[in-house]
Amino acid sequence: MKLDGAVSLITGGSKGLGLAIAHRLRAEGARVIVADIDNVALEALPDVFDRRSLDVTQPDEAKSTVEAIAAMYGRIDVLVNNAGVIYSEPLVNLMNPDGMMHSYDRFRQCLRVNLDSVFIMTSAVVEQMVLRRTKGVVINISSISARGNEGQTAYSAAKAAVNAMTVTWSKELGRLGIRCNAVAPGFVDTPSTRAALNETIIKHIEGLTPLRRLGRAEEIAQAVVAAIANDFLNGTILDVNGGVTI
């Protein structure tokens, strides 16, 4: 797909990795709509972006927002499901005998934000693609944690499920001319990573990575562009992790 002029919707695009993706798509000539629940961050974005306040975990809100975007632009060519929150909690916390086991409520909340949102947004956007006969692309932002990351039961489960949905949708939607791929970053130097991991863990990760550093958001954005642009790439989970999984 040629990105020049492509109508592209990015969730969680007001900061961090999502903002890097938004800037990269804009640089490629795409018309970029940024959807985010953080209204303060949305207001700080430059006017080159169409900004939409949206809670991606609310089906009715997602549907109405997507319908409004499709009506305004005539179509949606690209959806990047980037919205999500890194979450860490061990299954058993031996340091907390009064609350040793992983909270089920927090488990469900993590899945709601990182998994349900992908289903909700993709359902809403693909409906418009089908109705308007758009040969579009869905890119899901997965994670290296989908392989199973110690201390991240809920987050790893969510991202593994995102990978499974990506492959499933690539088979279902490919016959309609709609491709679906995922980009699975390794550990990327973003504020959310710094908030989720302490400096000791980050140094350990850098030592395990052949390139001896964290990734940069711009490098993940470059992979997203490649996954959109290659018209024969479908059902692929593209690992971008500096070789840490070798």
Image: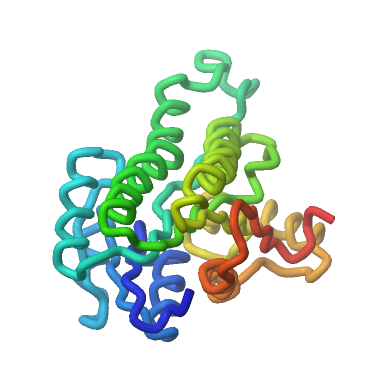
Residue at 41 percent across and 44 percent down: it is: 118
Q: Where is residue 12 in the image (x, y as percent from the top left)?
A: 36, 58
Q: Where is residue 211 in the image (x, y as percent from the top left)?
A: 79, 71
Q: Which of 152 and 169 is in front in this view?
A: 169
Residue at 35 percent across and 68 percent down: it is: 8
The relative height of residue 23 versus residue 72 in the rendered view (above or below) is below
Q: Where is residue 84 in the image (x, y as percent from the top left)?
A: 42, 48
Q: Quadrant of residue 36?
A: bottom left
Residue at 51 percent across and 64 percent down: it is: 190
The C terminus: image quadrant: bottom right
Q: Nearer the viewer, residue 98 or 186?
A: 186
Q: Is residue 155 visible?
A: no
Q: Is residue 118 visible?
A: yes
Q: Is residue 82 left or right of residue 151?
A: left
Q: Position of residue 157 (x, y in %)?
A: 57, 33
Q: In this view, does 22 lie to the left or right of 101?
A: left
Residue at 18 percent across and 39 percent down: it is: 60
Q: In which quarter of the image is residue 233?
A: bottom right
The relative height of residue 10 versus residue 37 in the rendered view (above or below) is below
| Visual colour scheme | rainbow
Q: How many numbered markers are drawn?
A: 0
